[in-house]
Amino acid sequence: MERGNFVDYIRIFCRSGKGGAGSMHFMRTKFNAQAGPDGGDGGRGGHIILRGNAQLWTLLHLRWYKNVHAKDGQNGSGSHCTGAFGEDVIIEVPLGTIARNEETGEVEAEILHDGQELIWLPGGQGGRGNSYFRSPTNQTPEYAQPGMPGIEGWRILELKVLADVGLVGFPNAGKSTLLSTLTAAKPKIADYAFTTLTPNLGIVEYRGDKSFCIADLPGIIEGAHEGKGLGHRFLRHIERNAVLLFLIPADSPDHRKEFEILINELEQYNPELLDKQFLLAISKSDMLDDELKTAIAKELPDNVPVVFISSVIQQGLVELKDMLWEALNNNNNRVISTAE
């Protein structure tokens, strides 16, 4: 998805370096014209390496970086000299980046920690020089190995946002407003669907100088798991969130049904998402009286903690932060069934 300065998907052509060829060389000295084989090995081809950088939040810096070629290793030479290794290429990526093989879809690397380095595409092995093949029965081997080729092909870099809490809800549920109230983030807020087109992150300050990260994610619509709306481009981001906070507006015609649709979309996309901690917030609750709150609470599942909030008048936000902090520090994950 490429919107403004947020890029979370990059397609690039990669080629790691070819290994250098081994040398077929024989030593000749002033007093011995046939001193034996002394061909050195070829140098290894350059690796393509991924390195995690916590200061990066997007793949924007790679947007025009479409071809990545590591250097080839140098050939070996006489006097048992090994060829120089090819220069490695280091690609810095934000935490949460996954590298895939475009052809097979296989995940080849995953970066989760700052400073973490993984050899994504190894360079080709250098060939052996003829001195390696010398033996009692073959004193003058007249052959050496060529270098091994590098790995090349189209690859995908895909970013999945790393945040402690992910906000999940239909468009216009109040997610961006809540994020701007709880944190210093300034997401775009407007009274129309899909105002948020890319994830927004913010840090929530909690008691005792504690904090946690919360992500405002683009709204789900029914059929998102099939690619409708922002589809998979949104759903992949919530795979990284430890806790999912569902937002349903107080003026929804059917709060229970809306919650079940959201759960179903997550289940259809990836059933493992149901193993996460779930919390439910009824937003825009300043328009409700106590009687209506009681009626709405009776509609909702008993096994999901519910809080009524209003970002506009700061209602229920302290209770919400307490619930989120407790959920983040609770190791007992909750499995939700839409039948409950």
Image (cartoon, rainbow, N blue to C red):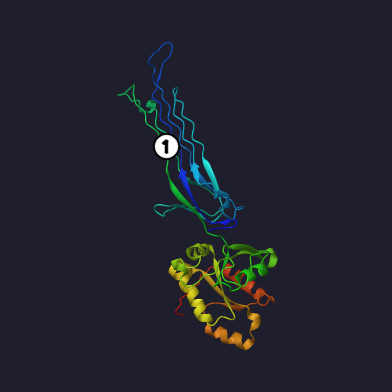
From the viewer's perspective, tell me whether residue 45 is left or right of residue 306.
Answer: left
Q: Compared with residue 75, is residue 33 higher up or lower down, i.e. above or below?
A: above
Q: Residue at x 45, y 50 (%)?
A: 155
Say what secondary structure mark 1 lies in.
loop
Q: Which residue is mark 1?
A: 125
**In this rendering, does residue 158 appear at all?**
yes
Answer left or right for 92 relative to 177: left
Image coordinates for residue 197, horizontal then vertical, percent: 57, 64
Looking at the picture, how far across and down is residue 252, in whole percent? 56, 80
Q: Is residue 335 visible?
A: no
Q: Residue at x 65, y 63 (%)?
A: 203
Q: Amino acid at mark 1?
A: Gln
- 115 above or below 248? above
**Residue with the most extreme left position:** 137
Residue nearer the viewer, 283 or 195: 195
Where residue 337 appears, as percent x and y from the top left, is: 46, 76
User: Which residue, as the protein is rendered here, is positioned at the far bottom?
Assistant: 291
